[in-house]
Image: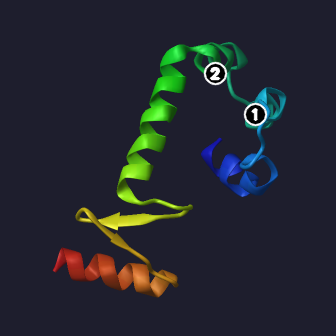
Amino acid sequence: MYQRMYETQAQWGEQQVPQDELFRSFAVEQGLDMSAFDAAYTDPATLARIEADVADGIALGVQGTPTFFLNGTKIEPTTYGDLADALDAALG
């Protein structure tokens, strides 16, 4: 589901209206348990988790996705090689 949402972010990311039916269609495409999906989607705890994640991102200066942090430091790799090099350096 995360992958599908990431792939289609341009379609829904800036919308100012609920995207309930779109997200539900993604869940159906993925073969998810729709009873569990519907329960989680409408659970106030889900919204609270999203709001907490957004607040964390704002506090850390995240302006888009993907954003990478390595050992608490924001890194800005432009290629997979840059990311791999940063990880290798951090691992020693």
Q: How many marks?
A: 2
Furthest toward the left, the residue is 92
Contact? badges 1 and 2 (CB < 8 Å)? yes
Could you say which disc has been placed on residue 23 in the image? 1
SS at circle 1: helix
**Could you say which is closer to the camera, residue 89 or residue 31?**
89
Q: Residue at x 77, y 38 (%)?
A: 16
The reply, left or right, for residue 4 in relation to residue 28 is left
- Disc 1 crowd rating (10 Å Cα; few below 14, some 14-19, many 20+) is some
Which residue matches tag 2? Answer: 41
Q: Residue at x 47, y 25 (%)?
A: 48
- Disc 2 crowd rating (10 Å Cα; few below 14, some 14-19, many 20+) is some
Residue 13 in the image: above or below residue 62: above
Q: Amino acid at mark 2?
A: Tyr
The reply, left or right, for residue 27 in relation to residue 53 is right
**Quarter of the view holding residue 60:** bottom left
> Where does the image place residue 61, in percent across and percent down from the top left?
41, 60
Residue 59 in the image: above or below residue 51: below
SS at circle 2: helix
Q: Amino acid at mark 1?
A: Phe
* The N terminus - image quarter: top right
C-alpha distance separating marks 1 and 2: 9 Å
**Could you say which is closer to the camera, residue 8 or residue 27?**
8
> Where does the image place residue 28, in percent across and percent down from the top left?
79, 30
Q: Earlier in the sequence, mark 1 or mark 2?
A: 1
**Quarter of the view holding residue 85:** bottom left
Q: Residue at x 45, y 86 (%)?
A: 81
* The C terminus - image quarter: bottom left
> Where does the image place residue 86, in percent across and percent down from the top left?
32, 81
**Could you say which is closer to the camera, residue 72 or residue 15?**
15
